[in-house]
Image (cartoon, helix red, strand yellow):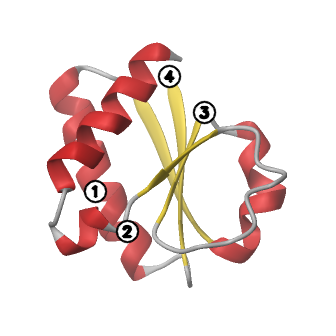
Amino acid sequence: MKKILVACGTGIATSTVVSVKIKEICEKEGIDVIITPCKLTDVQSIVPDYDLLVTTGTFDVSEINVHIIAGISLLTGVGEEDTLNEIIKTLKEE
């Protein structure tokens, strides 16, 4: 089981939309995941317990020791397929 942290500004609407898209593609690919939405301000304290961080905002990543993927395309639709493919590739490599 892979654990994915999805971070946005408030940890509510945006991260929920992104989480749903990630969950759908993971189910299609047969990857069991637990996805947790959170606020960007909570990432530092939560992320050590996760395999992957998908974020729709920017923040200091200097102390983050997990793979990070920019997820803004999952909101805009521009480059969405590439982002989803990167997520799947990363989860399969872990």
Residue marked by disc 4: 1
Q: CA distance from mark 3 to mark 2?
A: 18 Å
Residue 51 is marked as 3
**Which residue, given by chain and number where applicable, does mark 2 sit on?**
16
From mark 2 to mark 1, how far is it between C-alphas? Answer: 6 Å
Residue holding disc 1: 20
From the viewer's side, name the closer residue of 30 and 76: 76
Q: Pointer 3 and pointer 2: residues touching (CB < 8 Å)?
A: no
Mark 4 and mark 1 residues within 8 Å of each other at the beta carbon: no
Disc on the earlier residue, 3 or 2: 2
* Among the two numbered marks 4 and 1 on one chain, the one whose residue lies closer to the N terminus: 4
Query: Residue 55: x percent and y percent?
Result: 51, 62
Kind of residue at disc 4: Met
- Give the residue type that dot 2 points to: Thr
Marks 4 and 1 sit apart, C-alpha to C-alpha, by: 17 Å
The amino acid type found where label 1 is placed reads Val
Q: Earlier in the sequence, mark 3 or mark 1?
A: 1
Quick check: 44 above or below 81? below
Q: Residue at x 75, y 67 (%)?
A: 60
Q: Of helix, strand and loop, which one carries label 4?
A: loop
Residue 89 in the image: state x and y as whole percent. 35, 25
Of badges 3 and 1, nearer the viewer stands 3
Real-space Cα separation, disc 4 to disc 2, in angstroms: 20 Å
As displayed, is residue 35 above or below residue 80? Answer: above
**Secondary structure found at label 1:** helix
Give 4 or 57, whichever is nearer the viewer: 57
